[in-house]
Image (spheres, rainbow, N blue to C red):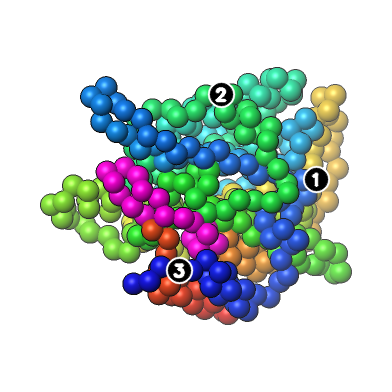
Amino acid sequence: MSLLNESKSLQLIENISWTYARGKKNAIVDVGEIRVGHLTISRDVRDSSGTKIPIRTGLTAIVPGDLNDENRYFFGFFPYGNVHEITGYAVTEDFCYLNSPILLTNSYNLGISYNAVLSYGFQLGRVEIWPPVVISIDDSYLNGQTGSAIEDEDVIRLLQNSSNHSVDEGSVGIGLGLHTSDWKGGIGSSSRIFSIDGKEFSVGALVATNSGTPDYFDRASGDPEEDQRHARKGSLTLVLATDMPLLPYQIKTVSAGIVVALPSVHLIKNNTDAINCLLFSLANAMSLKDDGPKVFDYTAVVDSSIKAIIRPGLESVAEAVLRSMCLSESVTGKWNRKSDNISEESFLALVEAFEKSLST
């Protein structure tokens, strides 16, 4: 089975009958002043017995603008399947706004990442940067990490160096240790432009593909490595941003609509897998400068118009998923496991699945 050539795969993506135009950078950073950064950690360490432990992990940060500008943004979350660890989930669900960066990492780095965001916010003199939103993604198939691989300073430097120039994709940041459907997973991003009554808006997606395996076995195979591989709690993590003025209940409707329109059977393979979709709008930024006003004015589209973002949002996610797989490089990690980039045959099948879902 031949592995996929990057240039050929990008051409296959280009040939899909997309309805909406891409943004200039074809990434989530096309939306407003969003910035993205990656910290990629690939090194081997020795445990107390001298055994080599491959560390294949990282962090990916989505920063909604300049953190010196203290703003709240309407925010929502839609889970499909099992909900994985997301700090601040309950609070953001109650308050329906985002006022921190969104970080993607694994559970070993989650606590330090959370504390570092708070520390950086205090350094900036912010009134609030709580609760930090940190999403835990299980990269244990390739990553042998058994303790935190980062310090506060690493996270703060990541936030400071995040950029809106472009988005690196593939085996970068948290994407380094991801594995999906027996192939190398990773980070992907894309964006679309759409309009309502002649007014132009944008939507962008950043995804982390880490969903299970082609088959799920309910009983043990007798091979510990095989059993662990199939017992992994995989996930497809979607972070979407838009400048369309959406209220929290509308954000819920949009995020749910995008998730249920995905060809889930081709993306979620285990009964332990999940799709986690986060969406926030940069419209109606609520400034907390000088403690902010007591009353905020906002704009919103009528409910009948929110369907205008579903298709471009779906296209952004679909292309981001495809890019996350075709731009990822092979990685060798824990127990000498090697995760190769996707085969041509499997990628063609995935492209066909997305084309079918987009045509309905």
Disc 3 to disc 2, C-alpha distance: 38 Å
Where disc 2 sits, the SS reads helix
Image check: 46 left or right of 3?
Answer: left
Asked whether 333 or 246 is in front, the reply is 333
Residue neighbourhood size for the residue with mark 1, other residues' Cα within 10 Å, grouped as few (<14), some (14–19), many (≥20): many
Residue at 58 percent across and 65 percent down: it is 319
Kindly check if marks 2 and 1 are in contact, taking CB atoms under 8 A apart as contact: no
Q: Looking at the image, is mark 2 or mark 1 earlier in the sequence?
A: 2
Which of the 4 quarters of the picture holds residue 152? top right
Kindly check if marks 1 and 3 are in contact, taking CB atoms under 8 A apart as contact: no
Residue at 46 percent across and 75 percent down: it is 348
Three-letter residue code for mark 2: Asp
112 is higher (above) or lower (below) than 274: above
Image check: 196 left or right of 331?
Answer: right
Please count the marks in the image. Answer: 3
Image position, residue 27 (x, y; %)? 67, 56
Which of the 4 quarters of the picture holds residue 309? bottom right
Asked whether 113 or 171 is in front, the reply is 171
Q: Looking at the image, is mark 3 or mark 2 earlier in the sequence?
A: 3
Where disc 1 sits, the SS reads loop
- Residue at label 3? 4
- Residue at label 1? 284
Image position, residue 354 (x, y; %)? 52, 72
Q: Looking at the image, is mark 1 or mark 3 earlier in the sequence?
A: 3
Name, please, the residue furthest toward the left. Answer: 222
Image check: 66 left or right of 159?
Answer: right
Chain part drawn in magenta: 323-339
The answer, for residue 104, to whether it is visible in the render is: no
**Numbered label attached to residue 152:** 2
Asked whether 358 or 191 is in front, the reply is 191
